[in-house]
Image (cartoon, helix red, strand yellow):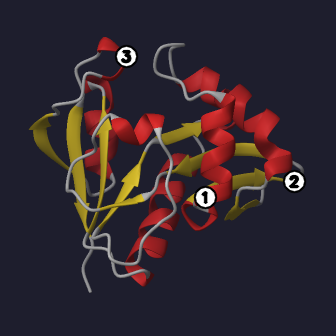
Amino acid sequence: MKITYQSAKLSQLPEIMVIEQTGFSPAEAATEAAMENRIKLYPDTFIVANAKDKVAGYIVGPAYHRRYLADDLFETSHPNSSTDEYQTVLSLVVHPAFQGLGIGGKLLDELAMVAKVQGRKAVTLTCLKELIPFYERHGYVNEGVSASDHAGETWYNMVRELRP
């Protein structure tokens, strides 16, 4: 099966929302309005994996000036700034029908390539404890418990340094 990677389009929003809700609890998941803003405000760092005419998964996050995510990033979207040193990941989700094919890892690599071209130092995200091994397999380092209390969960700071 051929998978292609490209910037998200507003026409894909309904499919993206279905996938978002499969990957996150209702308290964790982005709203449709938030996801629409992300598509509009940072299309260069909202990457969709396409399998023929279906969205197989996506990764999204804005550039940021801090090493670790703050909860306000989940609430308010802003355009990417060329001076921000870090690339964040707010959501990485693969549709259940396409899991186990390496799409999640490829989406991480695609975003890292964009971040590197844009001159970012690292890619940063938070994840739940059970996902730490997945991110470690893809070059991320666990830098401890996050200050985030998003959705009342305990999150871990994961960072992937980008080499020149």
CB atoms of marks 1 and 2 within 8 Å: no
- Indicate the position of residue 27 as horizontal and vertical percent values: 47, 14
Q: Quadrant of the C terminus?
A: bottom left
User: How far across and how far down the image is residue 2, in percent?
Assistant: 77, 60
Q: Nearer the viewer, mark 3 or mark 1?
A: 1
* N-term-proximal mark, 3 vs 1: 1
Q: Quadrant of residue 81?
A: bottom left
**27 relative to 4, above or below:** above
Q: What residue lies at 56% left-to-right and 37% top-to-bottom?
A: 93
Disc with the residue nearer the chain's start (1 vs 2)? 1
**Residue at mark 1:** 41
Q: Nearer the viewer, residue 159 or 28?
A: 28
The residue sitting at 46% across, 21% down in the picture is 28
- Residue that label 3 marks: 151
Query: In whole angstroms, how far apart are the C-alphas of marks 2 and 3?
Result: 34 Å
Name the kind of residue labelled 2 in the image. Lys
Residue 30 is situated, as x and y percent measured from the top left of the image, at 56, 29
Q: Which mark is residue 67?
A: none
- Secondary element at tag 1: helix
Label 3: few (<14), some (14–19) or many (≥20) C-alpha neighbours in 10 Å = few
Quarter in which the N terminus is drawn: bottom right
State the residue position of label 2: 52
Mark 1 packing: few (<14 Cα in 10 Å), some, or many (20+)?
A: some
Q: Is residue 143 left or right of residue 62?
A: left
**Amino acid type at mark 3:** Ala
Foreground of the two, 19 or 36: 36
Q: Work out whether mark 2 precedes mark 3 in sequence or the reverse, and give the earlier one.
A: 2
42 is higher (above) or lower (below) than 117: above
